Image (cartoon, coloured by chain):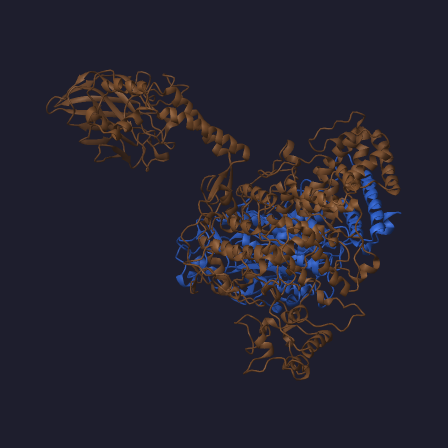
Chain colours: A blue, B brown
Amino acid sequence: MALSSLLNSEDSAMAAEGIPGLPHFASRAKRVIWLYMAGGMTHLDTFDHKPMLEKMHGQPMPESVTQGQQIAQLQGKKLNCFAPQHKFQRYGQSGQSIAEIWPHLGDKCADEMCIVRSLHTDAINHDPAHTFMNTGTMTSGRPAMGSWLTYGLGTATDSLPGFVVMVSTGGFGQKQPIAARQWHSGFLPGQFQGVEFRASGDPVLYAGNPPGVNRERQRDVVDSIQQLNQLAEQRLNDPEISTRIRQYELAFRMQTSVPDLMDVSDEPQHIFDLYGTRGGDGTFASNCLLARRLAERGVRFIQLYHRDWDHHGAVKAHSQGTAREVDQGAAALVTDLKQRGMLDDTIIVFGSEFGRTPMAQGSGRDHHLAGFTMWFAGGGFKAGMSFGNTDEFGYHSTENRVSVHDVHATLLHQLGIDHRRFSYKFQGLDVRLTGVEESRVVEEILA
Amino acid sequence: MIRQVACLLLTILAVTTSVHASDQPAAENSAPRTIQFNRDIRPLLSDNCFFCHGPDNNRREADLRLDTQQGLLGNKNNIGAIIPGSPETSALIERIEATDPEVIMPPPDSGKSLTDEQIQLLKDWIDQGGEFEGHWSFLPVNTKHLTEHSDDATTTAERIDQLVNVQREANGLTPASQADRVTLYRRLSLDLTGLPPAADDVQAFVSDQSPQAWEKAVDRLLESPHFGERMAVWWLDLVRYADSVGYHGDQEVSVSPYRDYVIRSFNSNKSFDQFTREQLAGDLMPAPSQELLVASGYNRLGMMSAEGGVQPKEYLAKYIAERVRNATGTWLGITLGCAECHDHKFDPLTTQDFYRFEAFFADIREKGLYSGGGPADRWGPSMRVPTPQQQQQQEQLDQKIAALKTTFQATTAALETELSLWEKAYVPWTVLKPNSAAARDKTTLKVAPDGSVLAEGPNPATESYTLKFSELPAGVTAFRIDVLPHKSLPKQGPGRAGNGNFVLSELTIRIENGDDVTAVELQNASASYEQTGAAGNHPYGKWAVAAAIDGDSQGPTWGWAIMEQAGKPHHAIFETAADLTLPENARLSIAMEQNHDNPGHNIGHFRISAATSPRPVSASTLPPPEIAGLLAVPKAERNAEQTEQILGWFRTVSRELEPVRNELAELEKQRTALQNSLTLTLVTESVEPRMIRILPRGNWMDESGEEVQPAVPAVFGGAPAAEGRLTRLDLANWIVSSQNPLTARVTVNRIWKLFFGEGLSRRLDDLGAQGEWPTHPELLDFLAAEFQTGGWDFKHLIRSIVFSETYQQSSVASAALQQQDPYNLWLARQGRFRLDAEFVRDSVLSISGLLVDSIGGTSVRPYQPAGYWAYLNFPTRKWTANSGEKLYRRGLYTHWQRQYLHPALLAFDAPGREECTAQRSRSNTPLQALVLMNAPEYVEAARVLADRMLADETTSDQQKIDLLFRRAVSRPASDAEQAILQRLLNSHREQYAADPEAAGQLQSVGEFPATYSGGIAELAAWTSVTRAVLNLHEVVTRN
């Protein structure tokens, strides 16, 4: 029997339907592209301008601000104010205040961005802070948001994973580690795990045929496996075998679809110009271009890590350098999605696991959890908006405070999910991405 | 700040994905069933009502509890929520059926609501009398089916079958027939060893028609050393064994001896109570053996951080809280971790219970931030553990050393003679106390009361010390410089260079008598040690002390040094050319030049003495000061102890004993080298317990909480009777005591799962209120009671299970049966399920013949895609695969990197082991297909398997395919299967014959050599066939 007849597209387990009852209501967006500035981007030199720090530069931070606060590497050290390291400008018709190190984002995207300057988180070290940002808890073993979404909503692709991760590494700052835990499915079944696409070697682990096996020969082997498994299926009537047969077909398809996706030679010159890359080089810009291609093919959740933002020293030079690595690609992605009419149903998230201190750590800044910035674009977020504020030192989120769980709740909401009703039974509990404490959908930033 | 560390939670409308036993409709023709509170009502109330009317004191509304008898049924003074027999007047029903949104329960804003069926169930229960039951798993284990404990597993197996039958019949089902003998044996082999059976063993079992055939097979496999490996895979998930620390840099940590301990324990059928005590508290047992200390490593298996900027207090709080989650998850199957920030919402567990449980672990020596330290204490207390072979080597060395020491210690006539001759020639030394000590450059010299001199302050590139003395014994024949270690010096000195070394480039001694200065001529310099390293250009061929009295004739940079002996005291001796007596009023001036061209090689700590003994005076026979003191006592007046002390020292310099000394030194060197080559493992070290207080809302910065002492949760009686503070050993003893109803239930439930694919209570990680009511409560309690009272005997439990007819049923389900009981709740068939990740690897290696089945040892590194570790840092790391046998070890020995677990294991749902894992998911994904088709270890296995097929004496393709099937799935291939593979073989024979380059490439995968000489195309074509077979669902499935 020809396999193609056995495998019609609705059979494909990868283009899963999600769970019954979801979405809870009409969704505003279909997918998320999360531009994850790993290491802790300084909010004070990028998106959150604090003239007071300029004025107080070198002077002690008032004790009333820092008293009883968690401190990382500055434990027991002098806490002196540190001025913004870059000039800020007003960009776009909306007049968004953005540092000059983001010329592309400023000029092209300010009116698309919804900048939230009142984030706060619970963890002050990278590893738990990443885990908290991605899974809603610092405890290991919980699913990442991308896993939650593919579990709940399924995917719209039958030849690619629903949750894809790419990582780029820049040339400035400390290369903080990123654990695969950040895209693990935790207690959810393994098929919801994020799949890393790599710039070198097999783009997906083990997706390349063995040496000496071309596509036709691989097809022959897969056909034989399938036929043998079908005999077993007929004999045993075990649904798990039908699933196995489908997975082999999908695996075989992925062996082509993934290289096709990664091969950007079919893109026109003006796209290369827009992103500032010809692709294939593992840079952040290259990953942005791939993210668009993944979005076009129906991938639900795409996360691009750029692991270069841990600027304990030389924050001026390093934040400028790192912004240069990120700026054009991020702006191109927003622009490109918009020109294709995809920005409406794609949410762009841009941010870090935490921010950095208004206090100097030599020529740099330390980890900071009490206030930082993220921005969103597309997917029903208000365009050209600024929301929330930190205090005059940029230390504490004070006005319209937004927690990490609020971000989760809001993103789920845009995807048609009521975060309070979206849970999975684990250790006897109905565990939610947004945890047990109160969290809210930040309606004010939604169009 | 509010932090919720452990427990997330609770929603409002549960998306329930699991299957409750109570969801299953009763068989159609049975009588209206009796409603049981625990089975039918409690889960319903727990899901819908306990959040506000449950155990959490802080959350309780209207002071109403629906989880207690008193709350539900009332007491003398209060009317309860229900009135037995009268649903229509029960407040509970009234509120549930209300229409007013202000009155109705659950309230609309909770997002919860009850279905009509659920409401009816509640009414029926009240109608039937509303009988309350305490939560099942917290009640004492029901022993009603426990007759006399029998070592005979057959008796236990029969009881298992009876109890399963009752339930099966009640659900209108009949048992499946016994599985065929091939399937049975294959199942047993996979279940007991995690390995597929050898084709010959299957054949032997099939043809053994004796009634004892099964029993013999079971016993043989239970005695296989692979049984311990199989069980270890289960246990290591629970106790989160890994080879890296997990947090941030995820650095490596050595703890494989613990894994060996687990394997050994299962193989020797160590009783579970003992196994429990050893791990939780092996270090607290009297005079703990190495085995017990290795076992105590359990407490140290949690994640650790070396991230700069970590606040130690926060991480200490994280580590100890994780211990509570792990110990309660591993042994109790309750989610006490949920009570870290608030009282448990569903189970009667409080925040106080949580922190009291933490306090059991407060004595474990640990750090919040692991920074610095040598290999042996990088991650806190560790010990080195020999393999049996190393242990043997150690013992042999120790015996030799002991024998030599006896020889060395003997007081022989020859030794005594040598000593008395020496004593005649002995030179006593007088320490010279300088009147002044000055340095040319910026060094500060400090003279101590004992006459020694310590250099402090800046350490200039070169330096000169000048010491002046006004007193000197008459007739000095030699001067001596002792260079001494000091804690203030680099590497303890005695030099001030970074490596503890110095170079004395010139020593000059003068007599100053007014303006008259005379140089003292020195000769015959000798030293206790002269550096040999880095002496290539040294004019003396080594860093000889002679260079210090040569008037710098060979250049000022050369002199005396001791690099290899840094950290130890040494001395140099300089004879005077003529006996020297200091004239009256004259002063002696000693100058020590240190002009080595590598800066900073100055002496840090030293002392100068003089002797008046007859010449020659040499370095090798100098006694230390305490012996010198004894030698000053006339021989006849020395007591025995003094004599022995002198002898003791003299043995270290005696010429007579030199050969023995050298041999001893060599052996001791070997002994140390061996010791340092032993594998490290983490152990528990008990120290003064630190204070544990309740952290309000889990906030480690909040110090307002009450201080607590160790105790088990109050619902189990709190503290067991003991004097003084309870210890981990008390905890372990309570866990395996009859007062604890959970451990035996949790453990047998998990063991049952290994043999059926699902537990009797399907939730393996929670037997609390939110867990699953067991499908077979009486069977679960029977097995638990037997386990508990029968010596916690794993092998007996397992033997009983596999002896049962229930176990031996076929796993094939008719369409009707699948419809009737889709989840196989009632065990009218066996389970079928995919093998665990490790066993997938083991199976394929075993089928191919590549498996190296040695037991235990350090972790190994099979092939892993390049760049997979690119995002690890501090330090960055590159995976280097092993070669040779280590490439083909079983999956459980693969290096377990928590953040980047080997991708082939990860694809098959192996957990990162960051927390306790009681239940792995069992997914079926395209990534698994990619691994089995393309990963080099699997391609290599296919290639080697093809090689073996071709080498087999069978001749026809058909026979070889048959053989292949027997090896891979324990049965011959059917005609249809033969045809499929023959087609593939023929087609690829042609293709590879036409493309020999490709055939060669395929054979290049993996390092194992090929042997077949009949042509590379044939080998490649057969590799396609073996790849197809090794990818079969049947290969990775236990049925």
**Rendering coords of residue B224 (x, y %):** 66, 40
**Is A45 in front, or is A226?**
A226
Q: Quadrant of residue A279?
A: top right
Q: In this view, does B624 lie above or below B905?
A: above
Left or right: residue A108 compared with residue B308: right
Q: Quadrant of residue B521?
A: top left
**Is B303 in front, or is B655?**
B655
From where the camera sits, is residue A99 visible?
A: no
In this view, which residue lies farthest toward the front?
B148
Q: In this view, does B1007 lie above or below B320?
A: above
**Rendering coords of residue A245 (x, y %):** 80, 49
Q: In this view, does B86 lie above or below B190?
A: below
**Is B559 in front, or is B480?**
B480
From where the camera sits, is residue B414 visible?
A: yes
**Rendering coords of residue B784 (x, y %):** 62, 58
**Rendering coords of residue A140 (x, y %):** 58, 54
In this view, which residue lies farthest toward the left?
B584
In this view, which residue lies farthest toward the bottom?
B89
Task: Give the number of marks.
Answer: 0
**Is B929 in front, or is B807?**
B807
